[in-house]
Image (cartoon, helix red, strand yellow):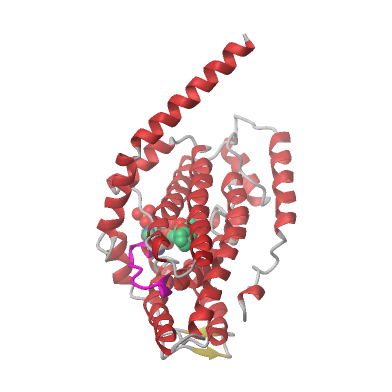
Amino acid sequence: MPPDELPEEPGARSLLDQVADAERDLAEAAARDRPDADADAYFEAVIAADQKIEPRDAMPDAYRKTLIRQIAQHAHSEIIGMQPEGNWITRAPSLARKAILLAKVQDEAGHGLYLYAAAETLGVDRADLYAQLLSGRQKYSSIFNYPTVTWADVGAIGWLVDGAAIVNQVPLCRCSYGPYARAMIRVCKEESFHQRQGFQSLYVLARGTERQRAMAQDAVDRWWYPSLAMFGPPDSDSTHSAQSMAWKIKRYSNDELRQKFVDMTVQQAEVLGLTLPDPDLRWNAERGHYDYTQPDYDELMRVIKGDGPCNRQRMANRRDAVESGAWVAEAAAAYAAKRTAARQEAMA
Ligand SMILES: CC(C)(COP(=O)(O)OP(=O)(O)OC[C@H]1O[C@@H](n2cnc3c(N)ncnc32)[C@H](O)[C@@H]1OP(=O)(O)O)[C@@H](O)C(=O)NCCC(=O)NCCSC(=O)Cc1ccccc1
């Protein structure tokens, strides 16, 4: 199926409808009484009614901590995720491809900023989150520790990595925490554009010279299993899934989303004329899904723990960006302070 016909989550609503939903959620939250006496019962009632928890609402500490962990990891992923594709901005094969890639990488920076802002509504400071990323206490997605060795990798990231990100993130638009759910609406819209540009780029390569087609196939061969691993460990080893699903942070388990991604992607590969590197991939009529080979979860754990092909390089680049960009941050803060002072003086 071409990506224009990406299946929406069953029952999912259009983005405009979702914006209207978000406005309604905010109005409902503002109108709600917030009884101090029975905060737990109040929280449980909001979750049971499928309404949104908002920043001023009472929430259990563990819910707050889980959200901070997931949203921070998500934000860090967007920021570190700029590096693999950023590697090709100066070497894009045409001006048009360069402009598209620049816009995509900028979008990823924007997603990181929405997500840090969403995390801050939970009472954490973004500077602390940056520090935890740099010290290794907070993680980012395993996928961004793989190298981009050819131009076709940029197409494969758009098609497979953004494709997997969308499958994971569309249900997060219905996450129980309002600011995270609302951030995801815009992020998903932009990720759809990213996925289509990746598909289109690979489509062109797959119909180019024999070398270009081989380059596209090689990129798909290398990115397929790491993309499947993005969904996390299998359900049997997922430490957080059961609780996160009970709290309606996650709406589907890791394995359910992985299967959804496989089912969607097989047909797109056929349109591309490229093969997915799994000899055991086949339709199972009884299950109504494709059977497929699982990714290597030991490798996933090694990469998460810091021992992937590019973990050290990614963190070194991030550290360098923070240090060499410190003067820009200082100048921006000084400028903002000067403008605030001038505005206050004018109003006095
Ligand atoms: C599904 C999951 C990732 C994991 O489910 P959970 O219930 O949270 O955990 P679970 O119990 O199953 O796992 C046990 C432990 O394993 C950790 N772990 C698991 N998988 C991974 C992994 N793949 N990488 C690293 N760590 C992983 C997990 O944190 C936990 O560790 P902890 O106990 O904290 O030490 C969830 O957090 C989620 O949906 N996050 C939001 C989406 C998101 O973050 N998307 C980002 C990528 S998309 C993007 O950036 C867009 C883009 C595209 C192209 C270019 C640029 C940008």
Q: Quadrant of ligand 1?
A: bottom left
Is residue 305 shown to the viewer in this render?
A: no
x%, y% of residue 135? 28, 45
Residue at position x 70%, y 57% in the image:
15
Q: Quadrant of residue 127?
A: top left
Q: Look at the picture and state if 295 lies above or below 75.
A: below
x%, y% of residue 245? 53, 58
In the image: residue 114, left or right of residue 50: left
Q: Look at the picture and state if 279 lies above or below 89.
A: below
169 or 11: which is nearer to us?
169
Residue at position x 38%, y 57% in the image:
83
Q: Quadrant of the N terminus?
A: bottom right
x%, y% of residue 29? 68, 39
Q: Quadrant of the C terminus?
A: top right
Residue at position x 52%, y 88% in the image:
273
241 or 282: which is nearer to us?
282
x%, y% of residue 222? 36, 77
Residue 147 belongs to magenta span: yes
5 or 279: which is nearer to us?
5
Q: Look at the picture and state if 158 lies above or below 336.
A: below
Residue at position x 57%, y 55% in the image:
187
